[in-house]
Image (cartoon, rainbow, N blue to C red):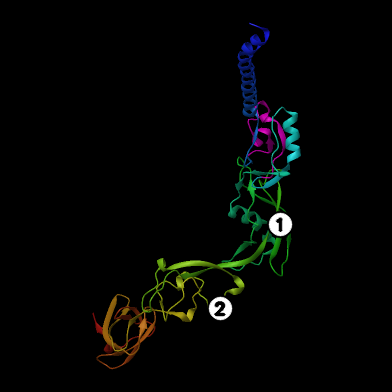
Amino acid sequence: MNTQTKTQMIHPTAKPQHSKCVAVVAVALSVLISAGSASAAQLRDRITVEGPSVTLGDLFEGAGDAASVIVDDAPAPGRIEEISVSKVAYMARSNGVKWTNRTPATRIAIHRTGKLVPHEVLTEALTLSLEDHYLDMPAGATLQIDLSAGFNRLFTAQDALPTAKVERLSFSPRTGRFAAIVKAPADDLNAPRVRIEGKAYRAIEVPVLSRRVSAGDAIRATDIDFVRLPVKRIAPNMITDQARLIGMTPRRSIRTNAPVRINEVEMPMVITKNDLVTIHYNVGAMSLATRGRALNDAGIGELVTLVNDRSGQKVQAIVMGPNSARIEPIAPLQISDVNQS
């Protein structure tokens, strides 16, 4: 067999050996690439922190031993601020975090959780600062604080007490408008300061009907609710004491949740004209009674004019209830006017 023939016979077996080596190298490279990808850190989609600092662990999944490295200060509680991507990339690279920046953004949003200071805590702090401007408070009135839209979101850290303190205040006595610099918590010297705006005014709680009450039906305590109105909107004929409303009846339909005026209600009529009424008269241990016919309608506590059945004499008595009235012992009553009971 000549050399040419040997070459032809050996060559076919040599080619598969070369292909096998290439395949092994390709698999090895694939494994290395996969291992590298698996160990690469991933930037979190939404970055939220609770504490005062932003760490690499807050920013990346797979930050490893560098997770506790501080990158920047966190925003104030409840706020969102941004950090530059270049700074994040530098801190990651400097601390051995493998991250390839593929985001087109130049800044990353950081949200810090917080605990909302209750509205009543905030308004109480404002009231303490404003009360010197409202020393002439009418009886029954209190200071009402209305915050402007968007100015009632004051936060503290999750582990802090939700307290507040006013550090500076500007106030207009003419309009009642104010602007205050408030910090929370109140005893934290490093707490962030927030500008709060609003309006303050004297207000009184006024009784209103919580449901429609028909004319003739007595108003009960369960029918009454309260609304706060500025003192300057209280008209002289408005009922401000619920005791003057309970037991009364509407003269006509009254709007719910609206102040009630004195002329809109009256005592329920328990005696109507021509009713027979028992008239009572008490003097010491003596009790006298007679009957009379009503000459007018009257409610409890009102005066009714009665004509005596026997004598035809007219008397005025205070209505005690349905078909019942009493004569006040102001002047002696003639025995002929009554029957002893």
- Between residues 248 and 118, which one lies in front from this camera angle? 118
- Say above or below: 126 vs 42: below
Neighbour class for label 2 at 10 Å: few (<14), some, many (≥20)?
few
Which residue type carries mark 2?
Pro
Task: Tell me: 164 left or right of 339.
Answer: right
| Secondary element at tag 1 | strand
| Rendered-image quadrant of the N terminus | top right
Q: Which residue is mark 1?
A: 180
- Residue 31, given in percent of the width and then of the height, sits at 62, 23
Q: According to the image, label 2 marks what residue?
A: 236
Q: Is residue 173 left or right of residue 243?
A: right
Looking at this view, name the residue that lies furthest to the bottom.
312
Q: Residue at x 73, y 35 (%)?
A: 89
Query: 147 and 292: which one is in front?
Result: 147
On screen, residue 340 above or below 79? below
Instruction: Please determine whether, in this image, residue 7 is positioned above or below residue 193.
Output: above
At 62% across and 27% down in the image, what residue appears? 34
Tell me what residue is drawn at x 39 percent, y 81 percent.
302
Question: Label 2's element?
Answer: loop
Q: Position of residue 294 (x, y in %)?
A: 31, 88
Q: Is residue 315 visible?
A: yes
Q: Residue 157's quadrant in the figure?
A: top right
Amino acid found under the numbered disc labelled 1? Ala
Give, as a single range, the part of the protein colored magenta.
50-76
Q: Nearer the viewer, mark 1 or mark 2?
A: 1
